[in-house]
Image: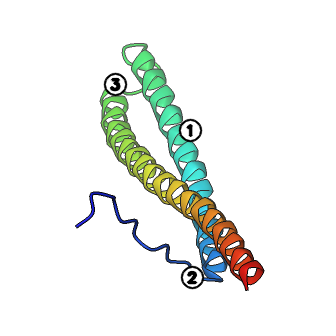
Amino acid sequence: MSKERREDPEIFIEGIDVVIKLDLGKHKEMLAQAQVSKASFQEARDHESARKRHYYRQIGQGKYDDDALLRSVKDIRINIRHLSDKVKLSQDKIDHETLIVDTLTAQLKEYDRAYAAFNRQLQQNTESH
């Protein structure tokens, strides 16, 4: 057996680029949606945090019932926790979709490279005959 490394044959599926482009477009859209969702959840969480600070400042001022303010702050904390969870899930979705987009982009580049090599090989074969 020869010490030379045998190269695996190139597999080229003509037209698969259409499928890759469709998937790439779909996942780019899903990535954009996840980014918008994350920004919305962050904005809502920031608003709830500001509301909580405002309510805390009102405690002891005598203008509102302190017990009601404390109950509201407790509810706001729960809302902040839920929104933080949604931000985390949105970030996970962003990471996942980014990985898919990067992978599909690499596959499309590989297809273009393989297609060019296939055409060169085809041209060489026709020239030699």
Label 3 with label 1: CB-CB less than 8 Å: no
The one of 126 and 49 positioned closer to us in this rendering: 126
Above or below: residue 27 compared with residue 16: above
Tag 3: amino acid: Asp
Tag 2: amino acid: Ile
Q: Position of residue 102 (x, y in %)?
A: 53, 54
The one of 93 and 78 positioned closer to us in this rendering: 93
Can you identify the residue that label 2 sits on?
13
Of circles 3 and 1, the one toward us is 1
Considering the numbered disc 3 on the image, is that residue within a helix, a strand or a loop? helix
- Which mark sits nearer the N-terminus, 3 or 2? 2
Q: Residues within 10 Å of mark 1 (few under 14, many from 20)?
A: some
Of circles 3 and 2, the one toward us is 2
Q: Which image quadrant is residue 69 in?
A: top left
Tag 1: amino acid: Glu
Disc number placed over residue 66 in the picture, else none: 3
Considering the numbered disc 2 on the image, is that residue within a helix, a strand or a loop? loop
Of circles 2 and 1, the one toward us is 2
Disc number placed over residue 43 in the picture, else none: 1
Residue at x-position 77% and y-position 79%: 127
The one of 76 and 61 positioned closer to us in this rendering: 76
